[in-house]
Amino acid sequence: MDQKNGNFLSAIFLCMIVLLGWQYFIVEPKLAAERARQAALQEAQADQGGFETRGPSDVIAPNADNFGVTTPGAAQAPVTPEDEAFANSPRLRIQTPELSGSIALMGARFDDIELVNFPTSLEENAPPVRLLEHSTLGDNKTWQASYGWNSVGSNSGGNAENMPNNTTLWNIESGAVLTPESPVTLKYEAPNGLIFRQHISVDAHYMFTVKQSVENTGETTFSLFPFGRITRLGAVPDAPIFVLHEGGIGVFGAEHGSEEISYGDLREDPAFDMTTTGGWLGLTDKYWATALIPPQDEIFRGRLTGDQNANRDSYKALYSLAPKQLTPGGQIETTGRLFAGAKQVKLIDNYNDQGILKFDLMIDWGWFYFLTKPMFKLLALFYNIFGNYGVSILIVTVLIKLVFLPLANKSYVTMAKMKKLQPEMMRIRDVYADDKMQQQQEMMKLYREEQLNPLAGCLPILIQIPVFFSIYKVLFVTIDMRHQPFFGWINDLSAPDPTSLFNLFGVIPWDPPQFLMIGIWPIIMGLTMFVQMQMNPPAPDPVQRRVFQLMPIMFTFLLASFPAGLVIYWAWNNFLSLLQQGAIMSRHGASIELLPNLGFGKNKKSGGDDAGSGNQSG
């Protein structure tokens, strides 16, 4: 290994140290807080917002102050009479195989949704994740959704007396419990002669369909526009790591990708506003989301917005359709959908296939979508066969090794030849120790004669980087990996190995600090990495040699805080590389001096018995 090759490997090593160091020292403390936050995300607060009223010349009703909606009080405000009325108001129960909760008949609000198949933690009897909630305790924490109508112009006044708002009490016209088999219809008769209905159905998962209609029994013509609204109030920390998006999200038209605006940007920047045909918008966390899906064949105006003040943070996703004329004796209607649930890949893809434009972008696959999603699909394929994502990781790693086998073989052949040429390379360095230019020329001459590219030995490292990233992304952002066990002590592949060398893996009753949580799998990974490096030709420079000797130790500490599934992948990949490299080196006559490199015995003075085979390559 000459100086150029050593410098190149050093550069790769330093880049990896920077990336992993950033992960360990900057990101991981935030991830620890984020893991605790995920278990405690329960939001609720009084509804507000909508689209403000404009003149009848507007094609799409723009965004809004409030549709006669009561503005909530300050943070930790006393419970108001409205809060008490809401707390005592009737509810319509929701029950599906994956959802449990209710709809508040006061305001027809979706504000009580539990995801029954997703416990908040792995603890026994852990409660299910509560996605939507409306608190009436004055703490201004809410995550809820609603649909409605507002007026354009002055004919109906657009006030609370005439239009339904968050204090309107709806009646159940048909149905008793909302289930996939039994839809319900809510009804409200306004004093101005308008009769509002919401026909609500739900599938077996997380998708609600809300068919709104308005009947005009009076003698006045109205211009009304339908809207949908998601409101979230209360403190929502920003996502702790750049590979994860949390905040406003949406697709606005077929010509656009997903629009992603973090909660922090929503608090600080002007609202995102777009008029288009086809798409959806909502608010998302790491694993959960709510999304409004307007009719895909109608023009809609969508907005993602936020606000921060002394009382509370506020985030909204809103859409409105074009105003519709409602003449006396007439009726108008529109249908929208609401997603409120877990971002399961297969389910999200199914909704995408049902005609919701680019709904698969709800999951944050990142810039390397073309690599990350196929990686998940491959892992899911073997999970469906074996029922264990850890086993899937092992199998996919073998397949990846097979795909890159020709390239890796070429790399290991180069390493084997380099090892055989060590005596001649050392002779050249000794002879031309005082003439670096001549030394480099002789080295290049030797490489040409032996048909060697010394940088080819770096290919296994370069190949591993994009695969490493795609598996990391899959483990981190897909809920399908959440709480997935492997074997033994690994009960969550998306979380770090819970054991630690520094309490003898649980023998000593002591919880080490985070930086000392060096589990069994990180140690296995470090050992396989160390053994593999000892099979490579040593760096000629003593400093480089020492750096490479320390690499396995540093990577053991750095990767200890990564998801266990990722560490299992790396350890297994190292083991397979050891077998492959050993077989190739033996086939090409390069001695495997692992024990001598470790200090056990003396290195063979290779070169004499191998000299005749230096030009043989396969």
Image (cartoon, rainbow, N blue to C red):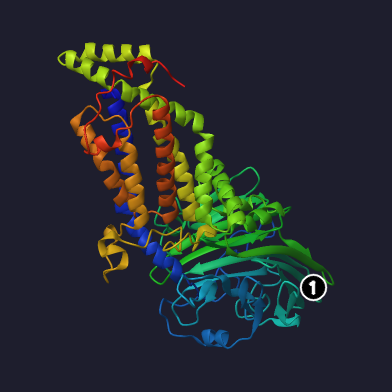
Front one among 339 and 437: 437
Quarter placement of the N terminus: top left
Quarter of image, res 102 = bottom right
* Left or right of residue 22, residue 172 in this image: right
Instruction: Identify the residue at horizontal 63%, vertical 42% (top origin).
Output: 255
Horizontal and vertical percent position of residue 166: 60, 77
The residue where tag 1 is placed is: 215
Residue that protrudes farthest toward the left in the picture: 434
Quarter of image, res 590 = top left
Instruction: Identify the residue at horizontal 41%, vertical 72% (top origin).
Output: 311
Rate crowding at label 1 as few (under 14), some (14 to 19) or many (20 or more) other CA atoms within 10 Å. Answer: some
Horizontal and vertical percent position of residue 446: 32, 13
Q: Secondary structure at mark 1?
A: strand
Q: In this rendering, is residue 611 above or below 504? A: above
Number of marks present in the image shown: 1
Q: In this rendering, is residue 122 above or below 239? A: below
Q: In this rendering, is residue 572 above or below 435? A: below
Looking at the rendered structure, the kind of residue marked 1 is Glu
Q: Is residue 208 visible?
A: yes
Horizontal and vertical percent position of residue 346: 63, 56
Front one among 182 and 386: 386
Q: Is residue 20 visible?
A: no
Instruction: Identify the residue at horizontal 21%, vertical 37% (top origin).
Output: 546
